[in-house]
Amino acid sequence: MQHKGEIIEKAVRESGFSITRLAERMGKSRRWVYQIFESPTVSVDYILAIGKIIHHDFSEEVDELKAYKMKVTKQITSDQQQTFFDEKDEVEYWKNKYLSVLEKYNDLLISTK
């Protein structure tokens, strides 16, 4: 299993970004940052936030992000292939997509009652 804290610490130290400044940007304490470095499991949200602040893409080092990036890339590619419609077909496509999402939302509301 990957030690995500060590991966984050290495990237932060290589970036030259100060721990104090990172903590301030995250709205956390310096101690919290050091605890992240020591933690083998770190939330993907924190990894992405830290990566955004230090301008580092963790998707090559963190397995969870590799899978997520591949999934997003596949979705974007799939969506791009579907853009070869004429104007009337495109309107119909988006209308159907909206109705599908609306039906799922209504089903979700019904199931939570």
Image: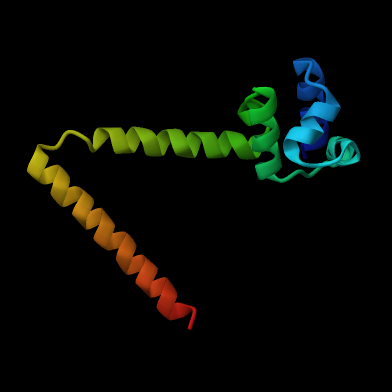
Q: Residue at x 84, y 36 (%)?
A: 33
Figure quadrant of residue 20: top right
| Residue 48 can be seen, yes or no | yes
Farthest residue to the bottom: give it: 113
Count of number-bearing discs: 0
Name the colour scheme: rainbow
Place of residue 71 in the rendered image (x, y in percent of width and height, measured from the top left): 47, 39
| Residue 3 can be seen, yes or no | no
**Front one among 36 and 72:** 36
In the displayed structure image, the side of residue 44 where residue 37 appears, left or right:
right
Place of residue 108 in the rendered image (x, y in percent of width and height, measured from the top left): 43, 72
Q: Residue at x 48, y 83 (%)?
A: 113
**Front one among 14 and 66:** 14
In the displayed structure image, the side of residue 6 where residue 63 appears, left or right:
left
Place of residue 102 in the rendered image (x, y in percent of width and height, measured from the top left): 31, 65
Figure quadrant of residue 1: top right
Q: Residue at x 78, y 30 (%)?
A: 22
Q: Residue at x 70, y 33 (%)?
A: 50
Figure quadrant of residue 38: top right
**Front one among 59 and 53:** 53
